[in-house]
Amino acid sequence: MIKALMARWKQGYRTMEFPSAGLMLPPRGLGLPKLKPGRLEKAAAACPYGALTAGEKPGLDMGRCIFCGACANAAPEAVEFTREYKLCASGRGALVITDEDFRRAESLGAGLRRLFGRSFKLRQVSAGGCAACEADCNVLQTIGWDLGRFGVQFAASPRHADGLLVTGPVTKNMELALRKTYAAMSSPKVVIACGACAISGGPYAGHEECAGIPPEIPVDLYIPGCPPHPLTILDGILRLIGRVE
Ligand code: SF4
């Protein structure tokens, strides 16, 4: 026991401060994009997933983007990725970046904030995901991030959950499980689509085996990325329950 205590004393306090001034994605991370509309043709042609469009309605859809950086490499004068990690949105349309200001996710209404603001349990469903988004959600429970200090925890049963966090493109094999999980949660409940696959199908968009999140499961928070960085996931969840502004 004394050895364990000594080791802990030597290691010190390992949990990062969040939010903190100047916090950014690591140097190689790709965050909020900045576009120069009117010069996007070359960048759009380099995008393997059709997330970037030029022409009359130029925009970069963060819900489809896998943040591979190919567009910025092809046309650095037209697309730049900042290290801004606050990428979550409340509406699907807000994820399309144009030359206007990005509208970040808003918190739930006052009633739901009162319910979930200090204790928010999430049920995670990996609906055909590759385990990258799942891994970055898992990271949030390690000592470096300590999600539990904000009152947010992953629950072992949908019966105990306030929110459903979906990862993966929702394959047809997982569609029923997702519907059943949502139905098993008591109301009020919220839904979070985490990662490009859950939001739009990502690299699997249009595949015959991918169903997507059914329309009767309304999404309250979109967390873009492939996978999203843990900073982005944490910011989105805390923004939703009104713990950060
Ligand atoms: S970073 Fe996004 S928009 Fe750019 S090429 Fe990759 S998927 Fe397309």
Image (cartoon, rainbow, N blue to C red):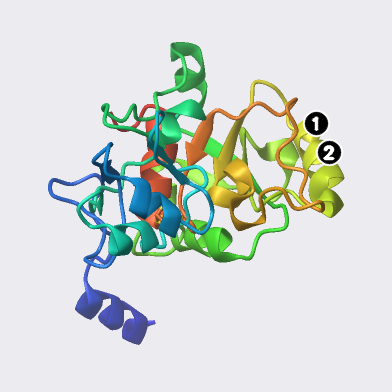
Residue occupied by mark 2: 180
User: How far from the left and from the top, in percent, is residue 214?
Assistant: 75, 33
Camera sees residue 62 = yes
Residue 153 as seen in the image, left or right of residue 205 = left
| Residue at the (45%, 63%) spot, across then down | 139
User: How far from the left and from the top, in percent, is residue 146?
Assistant: 39, 56
Write down which quadrant ligand 1 falls in. Answer: bottom left
- Farthest-out residue, left: 22
Q: Give the amino acid at mark 1.
A: Ala
Q: Quadrant of the N terminus?
A: bottom left
- Farthest-out residue, bottom: 3
Residue occupied by mark 1: 183
Q: Please report contact status of discs 2 and 1: CB closer than 8 Å, yes or no.
A: yes
Q: Residues within 10 Å of mark 1 (few under 14, many from 20)?
A: few
| Depth check, front residue: 176 or 147 | 176
Camera sees residue 29 = no
| Residue at the (35%, 54%) spot, across then down | 42
Q: Give the amino acid at mark 2.
A: Lys
Does residue 221 sit above or below 206 in this rendering? Answer: above
| Depth check, front residue: 214 or 143 | 214
| Quadrant of res 95 | top left
Residue 175: numbered disc: none
Q: Is mark 1 within 8 Å of ligand 1?
A: no
Q: Quadrant of the C terminus?
A: top left
